[in-house]
């Protein structure tokens, strides 16, 4: 579990006043390694009001605005783009060991980039463009094994000790069909937490969905994972999802998605796991899903009035529903 530890009142007004509030990832860190000062971030839009572990129900950062966690309840994404935030980055960000996306572009963050960001071995995308950063871009970032995209453009007096552009893999071109499929899906959803703000191929640097929040690609730069769990998304699934020919993981549980499950999901021949539990889906669970050759797990439990259009075989298929009437 992560947390935000407040410092003593005597520390307020110190040179840490501009440090960004962040979480630690375990009870051990909670008790022994305070991160930042209380109320240390200038937040004129009050987007971080939920970042308060003293409020009942907010002791877990997985429910905070701009924070997304993985299935182990460790922070996977920090997305605070275009919020007029000011302050400084802190070395303690390097303690977020499961962090994959650090998206802070379009703010007014100042100071330097901590070398400790090089400790984020799972980091897939970092975007700090359009801020007021200065100093060195640390060489430690160059050796991150999972890093796909690092954008530091449109900042202050940056001393570039690395030749890093918006994409570390500029030769990777997105497939039009995949961009279309994900764009159609986005447009079918209501997104109160704005987790899909990066799903916009018209924005420079975001033409490739491999850099979008919740999307992971394989070595051929084709979409392999869509992970949008617990984001209060509502709306409907779309048939175009069946165009994601390399998709292995479709993880949408813990939202409020309604409507039916498209039969086109059965076109995803590489699908290994689909998890749609705890939504508001109804209708048939398509028989096309039953024959997917790579499928290991399919969880539809905790939905509405679903029925099986085939005879499910547990534990692969999960969901206590009747067979559909012919």
Image (cartoon, rainbow, N blue to C red):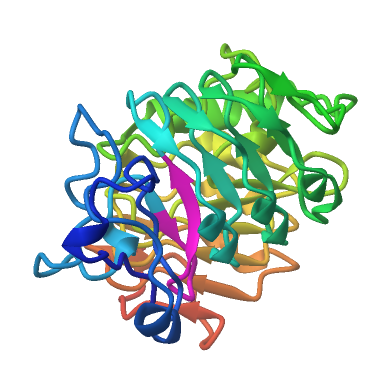
Please determine whether, in this image, residue 250 is positioned above or below residue 202.
below
Q: Quadrant of the C terminus?
A: bottom left
Query: Exactly how many numbered labels are in the figure?
Result: 0
- Residue 15 visible in rendering: yes
Across and down, in percent, residue 147 comes to: 76, 47
Placement of the N terminus among the 4 image quadrants: bottom left
Identified at 83% across, 56% down, the residue is 145
Whether the magenta-drawn stretch holds residue 70 is answered as yes
Residue drawn at x 46%, y 21% as measured from the top left: 106
Relative to 214, 174 lies left or right = right
Dividing the picture into quadrants, the one containing residue 133 is top right
Which quadrant of the figure has residue 171?
Answer: top right
Toward the viewer: 286 or 244? 244
**Residue 90 placement (x, y as % from top left):** 50, 50
* Residue 55 percent location from the top left of the image: 10, 65
Q: Which residue is painted at 9% across and 70% down in the image?
A: 56
User: In the image, is residue 80 part of the stretch drawn in magenta?
Assistant: no
Query: Is residue 141 rendered to the left or right of residue 186?
Result: right
Which residues lie in the magenta part? Answer: 68-79
Location of residue 53 (image quadrant): bottom left
| 11 shown above or below 264 | below
In percent of width and height, residue 179 lies at: 64, 26
């Amino acid at each position: 579990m992560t947390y935000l530890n407040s410092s003593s009142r005597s520390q307020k007004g110190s040179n840490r006043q501009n440090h960004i509030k962040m979480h630690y990832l375990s009870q051990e860190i909670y008790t022994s390694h305070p991160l930042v000062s209380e109320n240390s971030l200038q937040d004129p839009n009050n987007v971080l009001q939920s970042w308060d572990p003293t409020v009942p129900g907010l002791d877990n950062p997985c429910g905070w605005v701009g924070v997304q966690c993985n299935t182990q309840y460790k922070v996977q994404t920090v997305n605070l783009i275009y919020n007029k935030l000011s302050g400084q980055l802190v070395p303690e960000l390097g303690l977020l060991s499961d962090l994959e996306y650090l998206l802070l572009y379009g703010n007014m963050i100042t100071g330097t980039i901590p070398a400790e960001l090089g400790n984020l071995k799972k980091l897939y995308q970092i975007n700090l463009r359009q801020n007021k950063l200065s100093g060195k871009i640390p060489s430690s970032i160059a050796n991150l094994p999972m890093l796909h995209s690092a954008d530091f453009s449109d900042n202050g007096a940056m001393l570039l000790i690395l030749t890093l552009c918006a994409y570390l893999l500029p030769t990777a071109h997105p497939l039009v069909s995949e961009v279309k499929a994900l764009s159609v899906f986005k447009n079918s959803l209501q997104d109160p937490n704005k987790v899909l703000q990066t799903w916009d191929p018209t924005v420079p640097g975001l033409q490739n969905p491999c850099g979008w929040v919740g999307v992971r690609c394989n070595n051929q730069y084709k979409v392999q994972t869509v992970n949008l769990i617990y984001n209060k998304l509502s709306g409907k699934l779309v048939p175009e999802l069946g165009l994601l020919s390399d998709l292995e993981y479709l993880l949408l549980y813990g939202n409020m998605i309604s409507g039916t499950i498209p039969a086109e999901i059965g076109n995803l021949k590489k699908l290994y796991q689909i998890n749609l539990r705890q939504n508001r889906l109804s209708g048939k669970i398509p028989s096309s899903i039953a024959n997917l050759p790579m499928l290991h797990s399919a969880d539809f439990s905790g939905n509405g009035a679903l029925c099986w259009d085939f005879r499910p075989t547990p534990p692969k298929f999960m969901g206590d529903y009747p067979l559909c009437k012919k």
